[in-house]
Image: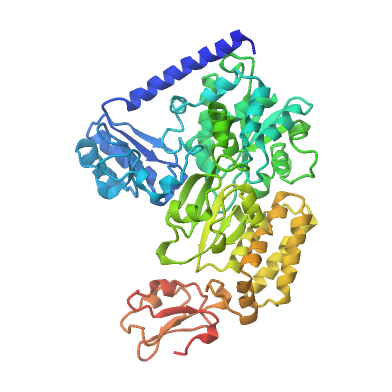
Amino acid sequence: MKVAEKTAVAAAFQEIKNRAESHWQELWDSSHPVILVGAATCGRAAGALEMLQALRDEVKKHKLDCPVIEVGCMGHCYAEPLVIVKKPGYPPICYGYVNPVIAERLVKEFIIGDNPCPEFVIGALEDNDIVPSFADFPRAKFEKKVILKNCGHIDPTEIEHYIAGGGYSALAKALQMTPEKITDEVKRSGLRGRGGAGFPTGQKWQYCRDARGRPKYIICNADEGDPGAFMDRSILESDPHSVIEGMIIAGYAVGARYGYIYVRAEYPLAVARLQIALRQGKKMNLLGNHILGSNFSFDITLFQGSGAFVCGEETALISSIEGKAGIPHHRPPYPAAKGLDGKPTLINNVKTLASVRHIINNGAEWFTGIGTKNSPGTAVFALAGKIVNTGLVEVPMGTTLRQIIFEVGSGVPKGKLFKAVQIGGPSGGCLPESALDLPVDFDSLRDAGAMMGSGGMVVLDEDDCMVEIARYFLEFTQRESCGKCTFCRLGTKQMLEILSDFTLGQGKIEDIDMLNSLAEDVKAGSLCGLGQTAPNPILTTLRYFRDEYEEHILMGRCPALMCTHLIAYYILPDKCERSCDACIGTCTVEAITSNKKRIKVIDQEKCVNCGTCLTACPPQYSAVVKLSPPSEVPKE
């Protein structure tokens, strides 16, 4: 790039940056308070929109100069709906479990008055002497937000907010570098694909750059379909420009002119915010022809997938964009050499692309200073399942599972015992308590039989049956199989039948070895990553929880009391309160009746083992019990 062109790029971006910073300072650096409302999908599901309207109505009612702004996911999904209030003289304070009534109180008592309402505070964003801060939480010493830095703190529909926080400065810097230099910087950073495979990103960029053929394409793989995973969705809803900026830089580095964001249509809010972001990028000349006055042009098209899990695989995703069935193809050739329309195509995950701007801005050495030698940077996880603090977390690679689950996530609720963690999505592995001190990185998890995956982390407790868990996840992957290759099409079906027999108490002990052998064959013989990793839940549960399989088969017993056909509900006569009919009123199949002494009895022929009677029975009586096998239960 010529000196004059570099100067033009720098000048064009500086003008944009000055306007954005002026807009941002007008919003924050003034005498009026500002309210931020977490209105991503997680917040909306908890009632954020109703609370948002209540806030706006109250502010309008009192004629206050107080902007109420929608932001994305703050990560603390367990406490949704969330609100951050920044008032002059106070630190920014985050409030949790906010409903319309609490919202009105915050306006009246804190915005108008001086009572920060500490009873609703989750934590302050800065150290202070008024309310507890997030820095005091045990999780603070483990979290390091890089990719999630903006999430929940900027309006994702306002590009000025992103730019004022340093957004698109990496693009301006990259356009003043050579494509070779950018690719080399990404290679030196050691960034590995955050979609799950962990392939070196810079190496993939180099392959695409060196490949013959024009035009070249960039594809952002946002087809996140794992049960319990919502990292990519939250980033797209909360900070879409970070992904777009990474795509543009990648396009410049490999010589691509066009890009696609492949996002599933089941993410309507992510789709809407991406559409807004793309329009804003074009309006500011950050997308389209001659970006920032340079000779580089790049356009992005938003493509909505139909929700097929297999389309998360690169070649199936490409087929979907081409208008064909989303079915994987043999590799090689790899997409970097022959992808969309037979042309060189670079495919990266949402989190991978969102990492690029930080590497360009801060340098490869900064990035390698985070995490481990072979897995530098941070990892983003969606904590779900039996854990106190569900939500998004970002920690340096190498942080242990114990630290993530018990320090960041605050452990297992209701005093239950930790049993396992399913990591890596439905194709990941179930790791036991003995693996809690395992460092979370690509290689360590693979050696343990699991994988990083896209970042789903589902915590299981003592009430979870590992045989049923393996069956549940295999049922998902078997249903999502495209059916192209025999091992995946028939192998997963046969494995599912064996597992189903185990949960019914109908298996044979020799079936365990058959299941293990079949799982290894499916793993080795399947065409794409779906079939190759689908057996992981089986292999890891057999490896770490084989005793549970044996109990199901040899004793007809589910030790976790989870498998419906191996349990029964009974009412203990000496604990049943005669005047209480709570269980009778909740039984949908009328399986519970009273005897002459008004002691309740469950008709086992009618009972469908739904468990509503156990839930309905008042805790002071605890007369309903669930046991396995049923023969152990005393007669009424």
Q: Find residue 123 and report its horizontal and vertical position in percent.
A: 33, 45
Which is nearer the eye, 199 or 59? 199
Q: Position of residue 333 (x, y in %)?
A: 80, 38
Q: Please, which colouring scheme is shown?
A: rainbow
The residue lying toward the viewer, choosing from 266 and 342, is 342
Q: Residue at the location (64% across, 37% down)?
A: 348
Direction from residue 19 to residue 541 in the image, left or right: right
Task: Please report the residue visible at 60 percent of the width from the left and 37 percent of the height from the top.
Answer: 352
Q: Is residue 44 visible?
A: no
Q: Quadrant of residue 468?
A: bottom right
Residue 433 vs 328, above or below: the answer is below
Judged from this view, the residue extending furthest toward the left is 113
Task: Locate the C terminus by quadrant.
Answer: bottom left
- Relative vertical location of residue 566 with respect to residue 489 in this rendering, above or below: below
* Residue 470 locus on image (x, y percent): 62, 64
Is residue 51 in view from this perspective? yes
**Residue drawn at the location 78% of the way across and 26% of the way down:** 213
Residue occupying the point 73% across, 76% down: 510
Image position of 575 (left or right of 232): left
Q: Which residue of the protein is positioned furthest toward the bottom in this rendering?
A: 596
Where 82 falls versus 517 (above or below)?
above
Q: Is residue 229 left or right of residue 142?
A: right
Q: Quadrant of residue 581?
A: bottom left
Residue 40 placement (x, y as % from top left): 45, 42
Split into 4 quadrants, where in the image is the N terminus?
top right
